[in-house]
Amino acid sequence: MTAERTQKNPGTLSGLQIWLIAARPRTLPAAVAPVLVGTALAWTNGEINWFAFVAAAFGALFIQVGTNLSNDYSDARRGADTEERLGPVRVTAGGLVPPKQVLIATYASFAMAVLCGVYLIIIAGPVLLLIGAASILAGVLYTGGPRPYGYEGFGELFVFTFFGIVAVTGSYYVQRQALEWEAFALAVPVGLLASAILVVNNVRDLETDRRAGKRTLAVRLGRANTRRLFAAMVVLAYPTALLPTFFGSFNAWPVLIVLTVPIAVALVRTVASHTDGPTLNSALARAGMLELAFCVLLTVGLLLN
């Protein structure tokens, strides 16, 4: 039995540790990274509102945590999280937290996101209300509702849309109340790397998801094709991030992102050659750190313009 499976013993974990497991901290870079990029892009066009930046960052974090808790609750109810999972234990299915408490925590997380959104709506208008409502609804319906789209292979599209396109352009819009093509261009690589995190998760869980009736993209495509998809997502993030530089919007500083290439190469090789849980769990964490490092360097490159 691996160390991660021994987490099923509630007596070995504190309450804080259990809720940290529930929040899935390895996924949280996908929430913060696009806010950094969108805000940095706005900075290239003038002063920014720091309160709006903080509200957007915390709002994104709470939506991510709320989505993770909602998925934990819904997957347990549907019997998708079993003893055979290769990933870390889920708190509802593992009996670490009663389902009702997980559901209450889900509502609380989304409520905190709404509070952050109120300030953003005040300064940026009702467009932010639509963005926030759509993000929360999409998070709940990912594994919840009568026909969860995460079970039908649309999870990566959800992540690309909401943790890439919507998050980057929304963060820019909060600051400028307008949109430029560069915001959409820079949202693409962010969305690709965020989606790649989910691809690693689904490659790891491919067999157990298939047996549980979850038709994720990995289940639909098969392991070999999903590995190719992961490599393509990671590779394409680099040229797409440099498109605005290529077309003269910025100087050469965004090319700092190439410093993450060794991390990306090692990660692609790991995903391509391993099927065991511990290795892919580590790869999942490194995929999150790749996105964060990539976005931090892209942010620095934008700020140096």
Image: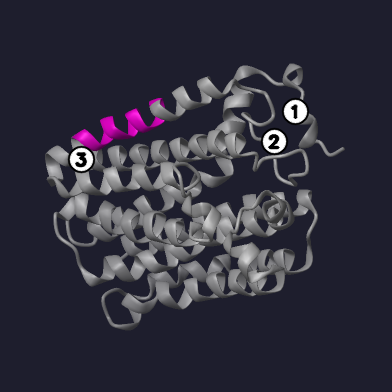
Determine the secondary structure under disc 3: helix
Distance between mark 3 and mark 1 Cα atoms: 40 Å
Picture residue at 58% right of the left edge, 32% below the top = 22
Residue 264 appears in the rendering? yes
Dot 3 corresponds to which residue?
Answer: 120
Q: Quadrant of residue 165?
A: bottom left
Picture residue at 47% right of the left edge, 41% below the top = 144
Distance between mark 1 and mark 2 Cα atoms: 6 Å
* Amino acid identity at mark 1: Lys
Circle 2 or circle 3, nearest the eye:
2
Vertical comparison of 203 with 140: above or below: below
* Amino acid identity at mark 2: Val
Circle 3 or circle 1, nearest the eye:
1
Picture residue at 41% right of the left edge, 39% below the top = 61
- Towards the viewer: 105 or 113: 105
- Towards the viewer: 195 or 16: 195
Vertical comparison of 84 with 252: above or below: above
Dot 2 corresponds to which residue?
Answer: 89
Determine the secondary structure under disc 2: loop
Q: Do residues under tags 1 and 2 come within 8 Å of each other at their CB atoms? A: yes
Predominant secondary structure in magenta? helix
Dot 1 corresponds to which residue?
Answer: 8
Q: Which residues are magenta?
A: 108-118
**Left or right of 233 on screen, residue 247:** left
